[in-house]
Image: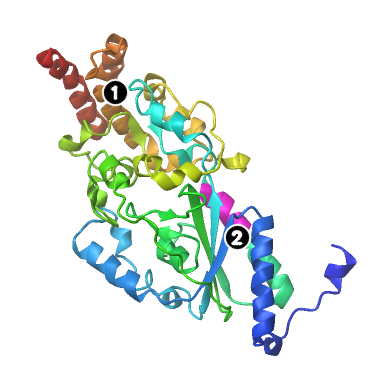
């Protein structure tokens, strides 16, 4: 620690009440955030009245599916000051993650023997990266003003991250329910610092979706049931990640080769033509996860699955759901007339019929039936 840091005198509470000092402090926070790798930093208050009404209506319609944690915490998710007592303002941040050219991801969706994994999960688990940077930002602020009340979040607690980001000016919530920014698109993570500081707030973002409905028409399972409304029960991201139950049969053939999450609503959003590849090496694809062969992934035993997904968000779904998802993709691959690996796929699926999981067995059995479906069509 240099001498300047050793002799730094934190601001007093009286000084913190000075609007000029608070304004200067916000500028410092944003500068520190940019230095830490956040592409945008905004400040908002705790009022989520409108978002609360929409969220509660969504819950009443059971669109959260089996994600019971979405309703578990009462009003804490929509009222930040109840989640963290004393919260007066919230620092919202954005960190870009897209690891490649969008065209590569779109082409991968057209390769039935390869698996598509949501691009956010190809590298290191973002929870760890964003949280660590947020803690560093909070410590810098603490050094500047002395001890204060705060708590950091990144998709790790009952927090309505998207409405907070919209109010903080990070971007607007698009019709696909993701946050968009007109100069960079939607390929970014969000994080927050809840504070007991009366920081001046930023202006909310302005919606620029207009009459565009490309995200709605791009959704493979029609999960965007209305503009700004996603029914999780139909969403491939929910089906392959959040749900640990059987995937509804009527949705399986619509999933294609998507084995962990889905990016279609973002891939075909016009605003994402302005997206930039991330500079964060932590988010670069690990191993062959960017364009893997389904058969290779399907043959992993549990130990191999845990090893090959260590440090990524993928690991949290477990080996059983991993096999379930890939079985569906392999079944869809068997439906393709031009696929040359039918024999190998059938052999691999047949071997998995011996798996002790009834969930895996059921999806493997469905997959094997898809070959006969193709023959019937022929």
Name which residue lies at 13% across and 19% down.
373
Name which residue lies at 72% across and 85% down.
12
> Could you say which disc has been placed on residue 142 in the image?
none
> Could you say which disc has been placed on residue 134 in the image?
2
- Distance between mark 2 and mark 1 Cα atoms: 40 Å
Relative height, residue 355 to residue 55 (above, below): above
* Residue farthest right in this picture: 3
Residue 277 among those drawn in magenta = no
Magenta: main secondary structure equals helix
Badge 2 marks a residue whose secondary structure is helix
Give the class, few, some or many, for how many residues have Cα within 10 Å of label 1's Cα (few <14, many ≥20). many
Name which residue lies at 37% across and 19% down.
295
Residue 242: image location, x then y, percent: 33, 47
Residue 68: image location, x then y, percent: 28, 58
Residue 127 among those drawn in magenta = yes
Residue 205: image location, x then y, percent: 46, 65
Residue annotated with mark 1: 330
The C terminus sits in image quarter: top left
The N terminus sits in image quarter: bottom right
Q: Is 372 displayed left or right of 99 in the figure?
A: left
Residue numbers of the magenta segment? 126-134
Between residues 250 and 226, which one lies in front from this camera angle? 226
* Residue farthest left in this picture: 376
Residue 290: image location, x then y, percent: 48, 29
Q: Quadrant of residue 78?
A: bottom left
Upstream in sequence: badge 2 or badge 1: 2
């Amino acid at each position: 620690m240099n001498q300047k840091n050793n002799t730094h005198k934190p601001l007093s509470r009286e000084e913190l009440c000075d609007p000029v000092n608070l304004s200067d402090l916000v500028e410092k926070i944003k500068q520190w955030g940019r230095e830490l790798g956040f592409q945008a930093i905004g400040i908002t208050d705790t009022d989520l009245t409108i978002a609360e009404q929409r969220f509660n209506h969504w819950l009443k319609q059971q669109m959260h599916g089996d994600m019971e944690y979405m309703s578990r915490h009462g009003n804490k998710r929509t009222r930040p000051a109840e989640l963290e007592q004393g919260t007066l303002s919230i620092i919202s941040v954005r960190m870009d993650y897209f690891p490649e050219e969008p065209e590569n991801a779109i082409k991968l969706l057209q390769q039935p023997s390869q698996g598509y994994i949501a691009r956010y999960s190809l590298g290191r688990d973002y929870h760890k990266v964003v949280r660590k940077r947020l803690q560093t930002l909070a410590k810098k602020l603490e050094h500047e003003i002395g001890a204060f009340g705060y708590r950091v979040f990144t998709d790790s607690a009952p927090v309505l991250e998207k409405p907070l980001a919209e109010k903080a000016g990070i971007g607007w919530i698009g019709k696909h329910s993701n946050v968009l920014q007109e100069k960079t698109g939607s390929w970014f993570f969000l994080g927050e610092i809840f504070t007991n500081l009366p920081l001046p707030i930023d202006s909310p973002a302005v919606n620029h979706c207009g009459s565009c409905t490309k995200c709605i028409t791009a959704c493979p399972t029609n999960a965007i049931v209305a503009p700004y409304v996603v029914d999780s029960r139909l969403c491939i991201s929910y089906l392959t990640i959040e749900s640990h139950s059987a995937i509804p049969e009527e949705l399986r053939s619509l999933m294609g080769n998507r084995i962990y999450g889905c990016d279609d609503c973002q891939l075909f959003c016009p605003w994402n033509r302005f997206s930039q590849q991330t500079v964060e090496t932590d988010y670069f694809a690990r191993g062959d996860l960017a364009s893997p062969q389904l058969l290779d992934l399907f043959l992993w035993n549990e130990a191999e699955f845990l090893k090959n997904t260590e440090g990524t968000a993928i690991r949290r779904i477990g080996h059983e759901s991993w096999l379930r998802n890939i079985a569906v993709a392999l079944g869809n691959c068997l439906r393709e007339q031009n696929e040359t690996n039918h024999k190998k796929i059938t052999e691999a699926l047949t071997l998995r019929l011996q798996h002790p999981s009834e969930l895996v067995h059921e999806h493997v059995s469905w997959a094997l039936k898809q070959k006969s479906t193709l023959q019937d069509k022929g």
